[in-house]
């Protein structure tokens, strides 16, 4: 039987001018740790076709408890180092699958 995520987290970051590559690198590092974390089914960082400045990490989790445990281990959400490269406050949404 296939395992399905109980929670999908999507965060939209807006990098400060000249800091996009640094933000992408930080997201890639976090993505690797998330993908290895207990209860994570996968993580990836995306761009948005109609919003080229946006950097959007997406992760799929067994449940909210696993997300919160990972975030606590990372020093918060977003991770501690990320705010240094942002132009604005990130927007995080959590989705619960219904089927």
Image (cartoon, rainbow, N blue to C red):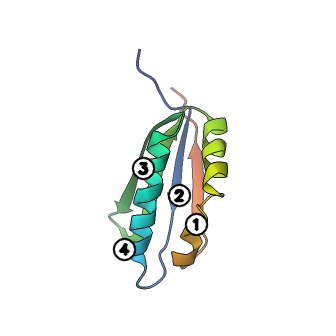
Q: Tell me the mark number nearer the camera, choosing from 2 and 4.
A: 4
Q: Tell me the mark number nearer the camera, choosing from 2 and 3.
A: 3
Which residue, given by chain and number where applicable, does mark 1 sit on? 90
The numbered mark, 2 or 3, whose residue comes first in the sequence reads: 2
The numbered mark, 2 or 4, whose residue comes first in the sequence reads: 2
Q: Tell me the mark number nearer the camera, choosing from 3 and 4.
A: 3
Q: State which quadrant residue 96 falls in.
A: top right
Which residue, given by chain and number where applicable, does mark 2 sit on? 11
Which label was assigned to residue 21? Answer: 4
The numbered mark, 1 or 4, whose residue comes first in the sequence reads: 4
Question: Residue 3 appears at what percent x and percent y?
Answer: 45, 23
Q: State which quadrant residue 47 falls in.
A: bottom left
Q: Residues within 10 Å of mark 1 (few under 14, many from 20)?
A: some
Depth check, front residue: 91 or 59:
59
Depth check, front residue: 42 or 33:
33
Give me the residue at 51% from left, 40% from top: 37
Give me the residue at 41% from left, 20% from top: 2
Q: Residues within 10 Å of mark 4 (few under 14, many from 20)?
A: few
| Residues tagged 2 and 1 counted as in contact (Cβ below 8 A) | yes
Q: Mark 1 and mark 4: span between their CA atoms?
A: 17 Å
| Residues tagged 2 and 3 counted as in contact (Cβ below 8 A) | no
Which residue, given by chain and number where applicable, does mark 3 sit on? 32
41 with respect to 46 (left or right): right
Give me the residue at 42% from left, 49% from top: 32
Helix, strand or loop status at disc 2: strand
6 is higher (above) or lower (below) than 28: above
Helix, strand or loop status at disc 4: helix
Give me the residue at 45% from left, 65% from top: 26
């Amino acid at each position: 039987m296939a395992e399905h995520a109980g929670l999908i987290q999507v965060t939209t970051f807006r990098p400060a001018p000249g800091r996009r590559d640094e933000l992408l690198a930080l997201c890639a590092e976090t993505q690797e740790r998330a993908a290895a974390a207990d209860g994570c089914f996968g993580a990836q960082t995306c761009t948005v076709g109609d919003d080229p400045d946006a950097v959007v990490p997406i992760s799929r989790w067994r449940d909210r408890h696993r997300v919160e445990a990972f975030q606590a281990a990372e020093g918060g959400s977003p991770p501690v180092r990320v705010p240094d490269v942002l132009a604005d406050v990130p927007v995080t949404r959590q989705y619960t699958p219904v089927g």
